[in-house]
Amino acid sequence: MPRKRITFIVIPPNDGQMQEYKFSSKLLWLGIGILLLTLSSLSYYAFDFHTRTDQAGRIAELMDENERMVRGLDLAHEDISYLELTMAKLVELDARLRAHHEMDPLPSAGVGGPEEPIDLPEDYTSLPVRKRALLEDLTLKIGRLEREAQLQAVSFDSLMSHFYQNNENLLYIPAISPVPRDKTWKSSLFGPRTDPFTGKPARHMGIDFAGRTGIEIVATANGVVSYAYQDRRLGNAVVISHNPVVVDENGEQTSRAGMYRTEYGHLDKILVRKGQWVERGDVIGLMGTSGRSTAPHLHYAVRYQDRRRAPRTKGYINPADFLLNWLDDDNISGYLASAGEE
């Protein structure tokens, strides 16, 4: 039986010679199959290429979004760190005010046992490790700040109550600077330093405020001038005992021993005398460079009358803890102003 063949006749234009092509039917179908397979392969790879391109674009978008989220968490972490510093300053201020009011220290806001983050999204465990760690850390810190803020609010309420109940006693706390802030600067702080004359290590029991000769020096609280004298080291010096005045059953005024006394040294002039009653803000002398001094300044010291309260420093404490009107806090300024009202 003769094989089946398929013949293709090509008739060229312009009366050219005809061309005749004969193929077996199997070969033709094989060619058609190869052609279909090639087209199918090209279609598959074209579709796969576009799919991969779309996926790569989506992955790039997700990675960019992830980086933005991580940066956002990092920025939030920085904000929380700033809030923690602010809270630490509030805790320090609270401790300072409580010491001035002779109140017990504020208890810690911490709780026992290991801390675990709460209020996290249910699917947060599917997040990348770094993002999950940042989220957990932020949640813990926010929780601690919330507890500390609540405790601090209660503490400030108790301070306000104590303040109003003991308003008169506040007048005997050396709570302001003895010199104007805009005309002086701190040239030597409380604590270890190098002696300006010998160059050897020494301990400074006060704060030195440098300025021009003649700047007015004021009493930092109500009290009685215990000493107004000339000292070999402090030069012209004034010592004030801040002893509260009380009225007895007969209406007679007496004084009782207070907690603090303040010392003012290297004065150019002394403008008060021993036994004189002074009030906060009264001018007691002028800045100078008398005694053991290298330039015009005021040596200002705060001391417990009961030196057993600070035996290592003979009763002296850091005056910086009492310069409340040098703090950039409107509430404190308001307290000081109202403490001076009758």
Image (cartoon, rainbow, N blue to C red):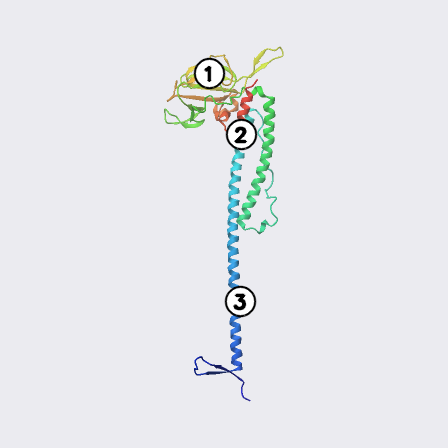
Q: Is residue 75 above or below residue 164?
A: below
Q: Is residue 97 visible?
A: yes
Label number found at residue 284: 1
Q: Nearer the viewer, residue 259 or 212?
A: 212
The residue wearing badge 3 is: 44
State the residue at coordinates (52%, 40%). 79
Residue found at x 53% / y 75%: 33
Q: CA distance from mark 3 to mark 2?
A: 73 Å
User: Which-is-in-front pick, marks 3 and 2?
Assistant: 3
* Mark nearer the viewer, 3 or 1: 3
Name the quarter where the C terminus is drawn: top right
Whether 40 is drawn above or below 240: the answer is below
Res. 230 in view: no
Closer to the camera in the image, 118 or 215: 215
Kindly identify which numbered label has been placed on residue 274. Answer: none
Q: Position of residue 199 (x, y in %)?
A: 37, 27
Query: Which residue is found at the position 57% from the left and 13% from the top?
Result: 254
Q: What's the amino acid at mark 3?
A: Tyr
Q: Residue furthest front?
A: 14
Task: Name which residue type carries label 1.
Answer: Ile
Q: Helix, strand or loop at disc 3?
A: helix
- Please provide percent x and percent y for residue 159: 59, 27
Location of residue 267 with respect to 94 vertically, above or below = above
Query: Dots 3 and 1: beta carbons under 8 Å?
Result: no
Pointer 3 or 1: first along the chain: 3
Compared to 35, does 301 lie above or below? above
